[in-house]
Image (cartoon, helix red, strand yellow):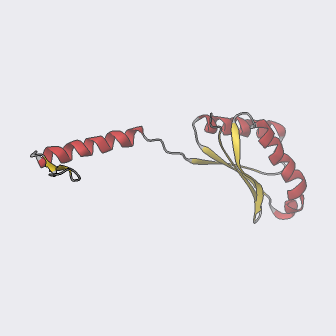
Amino acid sequence: MEVSANANPPVCRIMNYDKFRYEQKKKQQEAKKKQTTVDTKEIKFRPKTEEHDLNFKIKNIKKFLAQKNKVKITMRFRGREIVYSQSIGMEAMQKIAEELEEDATILSPPKMEGKQMVMFVGPKTS
């Protein structure tokens, strides 16, 4: 096996290729164990969600952020509720953003996507 191709003359080593492949596979498995994956969790609610339920969902969002996950906060408007998207909807999203201010960073501000208002938050990086 070639160790250093740039040297003059090139440096090579005689080795057991099966053992080498086995060790490489073990190194890859160890690296895979140590890597972390960031999931995106989603919390859904409606504009007329009550205060207690909203606080409970905020507590769940904080729990997701503690696990280093991103959170997609979705407010769904049904029927004629869409009229209140800029008033009630924005107020609720701003309240959630204020509650999460110390635990999260806002990745994207609230915006309308069809009949849903969506905001992404991620864990605060130190």
State whether residue 55 is above or below residue 110: above
Residue 40 image position (x, y, % from top left): 59, 49
Q: Please tell me in which quadrant of the rendered image residue 98 appears.
A: top right
Residue 19 image position (x, y, % from top left): 14, 43
State whether residue 43 is above or below residue 126: below
Position of residue 6 in the picture relative to residue 30 (left or right): left
Which residue appears at 70% of the width and 42% of the height? 105
Residue 101 image position (x, y, % from top left): 75, 37
Most distant residue in the front direction = 8
Position of residue 32 in the picture relative to residue 86 (left or right): left
Q: Please tell me in which quadrant of the rendered image residue 69 appears.
A: top right
* Quadrant containing the C terminus in the rendered view: top right
Which residue appears at 80% of the width and 61% of the height? 78
Position of residue 29 in the picture relative to residue 13 (left or right): right
Residue 81 image position (x, y, % from top left): 86, 59
Of 113 and 13, which appears nearest the observer? 13
Position of residue 125 in the picture relative to residue 76 (left or right): left
